[in-house]
Amino acid sequence: MNLDTLNPAQREAVEKTEGPVLILAGAGSGKTRVLTTRIAHLIEDKGVQAPNILAITFTNKAANEMRERVEETLGTDTKEMWISTFHSCCVRILRKDINRIGYNRSFVIYDSADQVTLVKDCLKELNLSDKVFEPKVIISTISGAKDKLYSPSQFKDMHRHDNRMSKIADVYALYQDRLKRNSALDFDDLIYKTVELLKSEEEVLEFYRSRFKYIMVDEYQDTSKAQYELIKLLAKEHQNICVVGDDDQSIYGWRGADIRNILEFERDYDDVHVVKLEQNYRSTQVILDAANTVISNNIERKRKKLWSEKKEGELIKIQLSENEINESDFVADMIAKIAREQGRTYKDFAVLYRANAQARPVEDALNRSQIPYNIYGGTKFYERKEIKDLLAYLRVIQNPQDDISLKRIINVPRRGIGLRTIEKIEDRASLKQESMYSVLIDIDTNSDISTKAKNSINGFVDTVGTLRTIKEVYPVSKLIEKVLETTGYIDELSKDKSEEAQDRIDNLKEFISIALEFEQSSEEKDLQTFLTGVALSSESSEDEEIEKVSLMTIHTSKGLEFPVVFLIGMEEGLFPISRAVRSMSESDIEEERRLCYVGITRAKEVLYMTLTQRRTLYGKTNPSIASRFMEELPEQCIEKLNKVEKELTYSKANYNVLDKYKQKYMNTMNKSTVAKKVNATIKDTKKETDIDDIKLGAKVHHPKFGEGTVVGMMGSDVTIAFKEQGIKKINKEYTTLDVL
DNA sequence: AGCGCCTTGACGGGC
DNA sequence: TCAAGGCGCT
């Protein structure tokens, strides 16, 4: 294995194969290359067997890319190697042994829409209003609990003094019960139940421990407590655990990622070898300086500074526009101009924004200028109604205990089984503690259902029965055709002559070809494997090679790069988004700042940042205030294309500034040095602070805001009245508060 | 069952 | 602003 093309840090990360390794990989530092080379090195030079390697990523895209690149490097196939996402890895483990913890091995996987339906059912059963207990809120609460590995009873106990949360805990308990009865797992369960299985079944744990002798985890900053625990279980014995991540790119706190996992890796494992990949191969020095300076305003981070061998590069251009329409026109004009003058092609450009709603005016402007674009995000193929209907049929065929899917299709297409009848079936099912399907099977013994409804139900049961037989002999694609035929689904759509109906038919045909493709490429060809694959993939099959400008959120852009990037809507309340501003929570603002860092570092050569004087968003026009992140950009890196400073009110709010330290050091150091100083101070005092000493009324010291008094506490959020900076909400888990 | 009016609320989004 | 879901009427 030739490692000569790697830089020293990269090489170190590859060669240090034994013991715990933390690779802090800055944006564009060749992280994927290091990981793939490391795997190849293990196999080729260290004589490690392929089955002993486990490599975990977050997205299918990353997993596929890694597998391809490893195969390319090694020149062999990697079938024996587990290179997969957390979720598909867990499914594999669970399919084998989940029966040991009382679940059915042929479980189905519920997506977020199924979750909503199930939670609504649970609320109904508990007589709770879905106005007071919004399903969305319930789901994210449950999801948060599972991410932290709280069981329903633990969760209930934690919140025994909080009436509302207690009720939510009851929903959580019932929800889990129903999932189990339906032989279903939601996405969070895939992780949670795997941890549960490994913790309770010594034999299973031993099996995987001795199998996965070398474990690698990508995007470690995005792991949740549950994922962290899973990895720890597997890696504890041999300690050959290599995690790669960038705390500065942690932007998924809102979906359970716990930045502490990367910040405290060194505490969790013994003798951790830390490698920092700081050489950036992507961007110009100007772009990196700007990114470094902005991110240095974050307190809680590992110190790291990107540098590049590339020359200085063009200054970052800042444009102030009248409103979002002018802003979009500016973007379109500049794309046209740069494409023409510099001979760039449209795929070199990306327009990045904080919220999807911002895409609209940009689309309009690009259309006016006849510039082709691809918009990422939006309704997914598998979320379409007709596809979900078909999937519900397939799921019921696979697993008749799945009440949620059964309810979805029992009267689709219409076959005269009304709401009243369905309710009766449900009642009976919960009375007898069994699935709706088993009630349907002997519906004839049920007296309070009309003969007409009984006939329809028997017809439905026959259809499903027939399809279940067909499943055993025909391939999936054929089964799908049969479903669409025998249920009359296609007939129903064909009768409808609208364009929409034709679209739906086309989508169903597209789905059949997905199934055909599956039959050709997959080793296992059964329905269950197909359904799992569909559940775990997101299918964003846009034609990526095509010559188009990319429009996407900054979140979506993570991991990608473009020669020319437009970061639009750099305004307070939009970016950082208003919720983060209003919550007054420093950790929320820091996550927004990391997002800003991600946005800036997408650019290879040219970066534009735009903002408006007035923005109409959600039907309301408001004067804009420049984003605090704009103010954090170093003067020498930017070029203001128009009179930005004159026209703008920079928010003078109590954001930014590191006051206490600023006064002390500002004369001699620049802002980023001050931040470093603060960082170092935190590191020193960290161990001495006991988080439990932070109580109501306690006098505390905050690294940025100085002295204050604790006036409120909610979970890990502490509200503090600062002497000089006013009232702020701070997450005590992430900030070092010294009790005075 | 289906249509249309009205309220609501809207960040980010992979598996 | 606008789209989706709820609700009431036919």
Image (spheres, coloured by chain):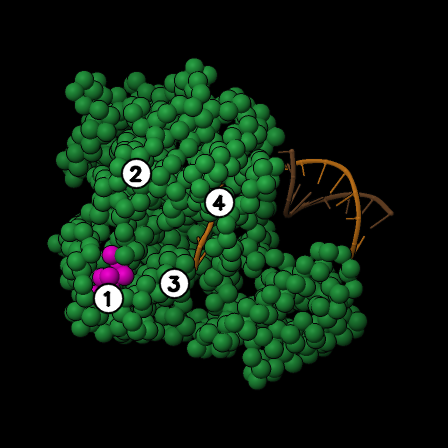
Chain colours: A green, B orange, C brown
Mark nearer the N terminus (3 vs 1): 1
In the drawing, does residue A126 fall left or right of residue A211?
A: right
In this rendered view, identify the residue nearer to me: A636 or A375. A636
Disc 3/disc 1 C-alpha distance (Å): 16 Å
Closer mark to the observer between disc 4 and disc 1: 4
Disc 4/disc 1 C-alpha distance (Å): 36 Å
Q: Are marks 1 and 2 on the same chain?
A: yes
The circle drawn on residue A346 is 4
Mark nearer the N terminus (4 vs 1): 1
- Identify the residue position indicated by label 2 in the image: A284
CA neighbours of label 1 inside 10 A, class few (<14), some (14 to 19), many (20+): many
> Regarding mark 2 in the picture, which secondary structure is present there?
loop
> Regarding mark 3 in the picture, which secondary structure is present there?
helix
Q: Amino acid at mark 2?
A: Thr
CA neighbours of label 4 inside 10 A, class few (<14), some (14 to 19), many (20+): many
Residue drawn at x 31%, y 23% is: A635
The circle drawn on residue A64 is 3
In this rendered view, identify the residue nearer to me: A367 or A410. A367
Closer mark to the observer between disc 1 and disc 2: 2
Q: Amino acid at mark 3?
A: Asn
Disc 3/disc 4 C-alpha distance (Å): 26 Å
Quarter of the picture holding the N terminus of chain A: bottom left
Q: Which residues are magenta?
A: A34-41
Is-magenta flag for residue A372?
A: no
Residue A703 screen position, x and y as percent: 24, 28
Q: Are marks 2 and 4 on the same chain?
A: yes
Is-magenta flag for residue A37?
A: yes
Disc 4 sits on a residue from what chain? A
